[in-house]
Image (cartoon, grey):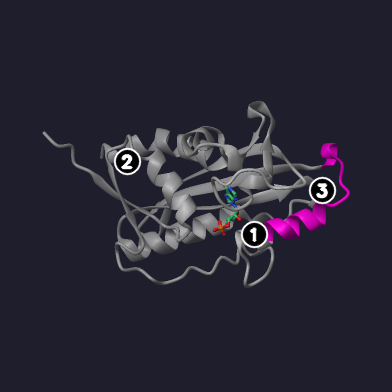
Amino acid sequence: MNKRLVPIVVATTNAGKAREIAAALRGLPVRVLSLSDLGISAEYPETGKTFALNARGKAAFYSGLSGNWTLAEDSGLAVDALSGAPGVYSARFSGPRATDDRNNRKLLRHMRGFPPAKRGACFVCCMVLARNGRVIKQVTGRVRGRLLDAGRGAMGFGYDPLFYYRRLGRTFGELLPPVKNAISHRGRALTKMSRFLPTILEK
Ligand code: IMP
């Protein structure tokens, strides 16, 4: 007999993130829906000063609109030498016409002259599950690495080519998706969330 699949909305318009989240939820009895599957085009203004505020706001907002369990996250890169920047501004680091390439070039300019020991950085992902406008669960995943002075690898998205992960001797841009997902900030947040999800799916 087919198990009942519980619909879960993944509230992101970032294709890279949507792919990673859908892959991580594959083993669970859920049916992953996107905002566009539901015809939701309203945009949540991400004006929070922390990843948690943005993720909570987004999850509550879209769960109210969708009427389904809704998963939202906010993530970004916090660079030690830049006092945590670009942080919540990671997507728009290079301005309103930001692209991954422009963001990476701006980051490289800011990091010019810093020796390897001062190039530490952390990817952070705050992930929130909400229903009917109410936050039910919040988890955070982090991974530390070092910024190179030139990009390597064409996989992933965002700052992946600059983010060197010492234990594997590769940048995130050089990792196959399942390898990145097993160690990344989003993967770690998803592992925590996936442990919690069965408790709601059984209800
Ligand atoms: P958000 O859509 O406002 O959460 O923006 C997150 C931004 O942080 C992305 O656009 C990327 O620039 C960066 N980012 C978050 N997660 C990753 C990742 O896994 N790899 C590379 N960059 C990431």
Tell me whether circle 3 and circle 2 mark residues in contact (CB < 8 Å). no
Residue 68: x percent and y percent?
A: 30, 55
Mark 1 or mark 3: which comes first in sequence?
A: 3
Q: Which residue is mark 2?
A: 200
Residue at 79%, 42% (x, y): give it. Answer: 119
x%, y% of residue 124? Answer: 61, 45
Quarter holding the C terminus is top left
Q: Is residue 156 magenta?
A: no
Q: Main secondary structure of the magenta part?
A: helix
Does 37 sit above or below residue 158?
below
Q: CA distance from mark 3 to mark 2?
A: 41 Å
Earlier-in-chain disc, 3 versus 2 = 3
Residue 81, labelled with which disc? Answer: 3
Q: Which residues are magenta?
A: 103-118
The amino acid beneath tag 1 is Asp
The reply to whether the residue tagged 1 has its Cβ within 8 angstroms of ligand 1 is: no
Q: Looking at the image, which residue is at 69% across and 47% down?
A: 151
Q: Are marks 1 and 2 in contact (CB under 8 Å)?
A: no
Does residue 15 lie above or below 151 as drawn?
Answer: below
Disc 1 crowd rating (10 Å Cα; few below 14, some 14-19, many 20+) is some
Find residue 117 and report its image quarter. Answer: top right
Tell me whether circle 1 and circle 3 mark residues in contact (CB < 8 Å): no
The amino acid sitting under disc 2 is: Ile
Q: Is 44 situated above or below 111?
A: below
Circle 1 is placed at which residue position?
101
At numbered mark 3, what does the secondary structure look like: helix, strand or loop?
Answer: helix
